Amino acid sequence: GLGVVGSVYTNHSPVSLQDTTPIAKLVEESDVIVVGKDSKYQNLDQLIDDWKARPGEVPVGGGSSPGGPDHLAPMLMAKAIGLAPKQVNYVPFDGGGELLASVLGGKVAFGVSGIGEYRDQIEAGELRVLAVTGPERLPGVDAPTLLESGVDVNFTNWRGVVAPPGMNERDRAKLVSLFERLNATPEWKEALQRNGWTEAYQPGPQFGEFLAQENDRVATVLKELGLA
């Protein structure tokens, strides 16, 4: 996923996804900006006003390390509303479970994570969604996009499959064919709907071109933010 692209830069890794054999891009997923049901923030405008007034005192939690999607999304939000990245009090968590406990417990002012992580808690009323980061509203989620809310950010995470470098063409083609067949099954379509994922299938060569573009895009963003 996108987190691997960003972590290459933030961790100064000697290798990247460019060194792998791309097999298939499968899905895209919007992040959601969430607060606990007891949060004082009823809408995104209230959160942004508070964040701009005292950025260091409004911690944002994310389920990924710096460079990952849950980190990039609030950093891009901050930039769009006029905050410097160094002003953002970002608190990384090891996945959505730890982040959820901190959001519900009020240890962070708001959280950013993929919709698939928290759909159950959102539907149960434990979490309130203030906005979604993608270009369109999400079915079953009563929240605007960031763009609708006047924040010039359009951001989605994606996930795909890569294999080790040096794979021979026969084995690569077999794997590409496998995921092409998977993408056409009704069970996969049901999984997409259940998890709030958007189908974004690309076979190996196209996925490889996409990875190169994403590598350049993330590098540019992180450098603009002073994080790479």
Image (cartoon, rainbow, N blue to C red):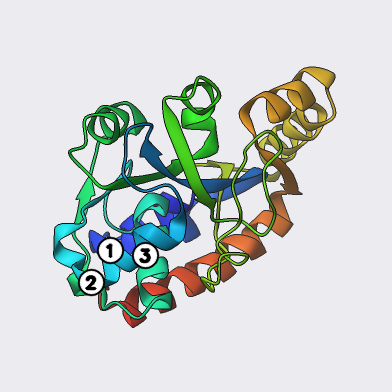
Q: Position of residue 226 (x, y in %)?
A: 25, 78
- In the rendered image, residue 89, in percent from the top left (x then y), is placed at 18, 59
- The amino acid type of the residue labelled 3 equals Ile
* Numbered label attached to residue 53: 2
Name above or below for residue 38 compared with residue 71.
above
Q: Amino acid at mark 2?
A: Ala
Tell me if residue 165 can be seen.
no
Which residue is labeled 3 in the image?
48
User: Is disc 1 in contact with disc 2, using a CB cutoff of under 8 Å?
Assistant: yes
Q: CA distance from mark 1 to mark 2?
A: 5 Å
Q: CA distance from mark 3 to mark 1?
A: 5 Å
Where is residue 119? Give x, y as percent: 54, 28
Q: Mark 1 and mark 3 in contact (Cβ < 8 Å)?
A: yes
Q: Secondary structure at mark 3?
A: helix
Secondary element type, mark 2: helix
Question: Residue at the spot x=63%, y=58% of the render?
Answer: 208
Residue type at mark 1 is Asp
Name the quadrant of the C terminus.
bottom left
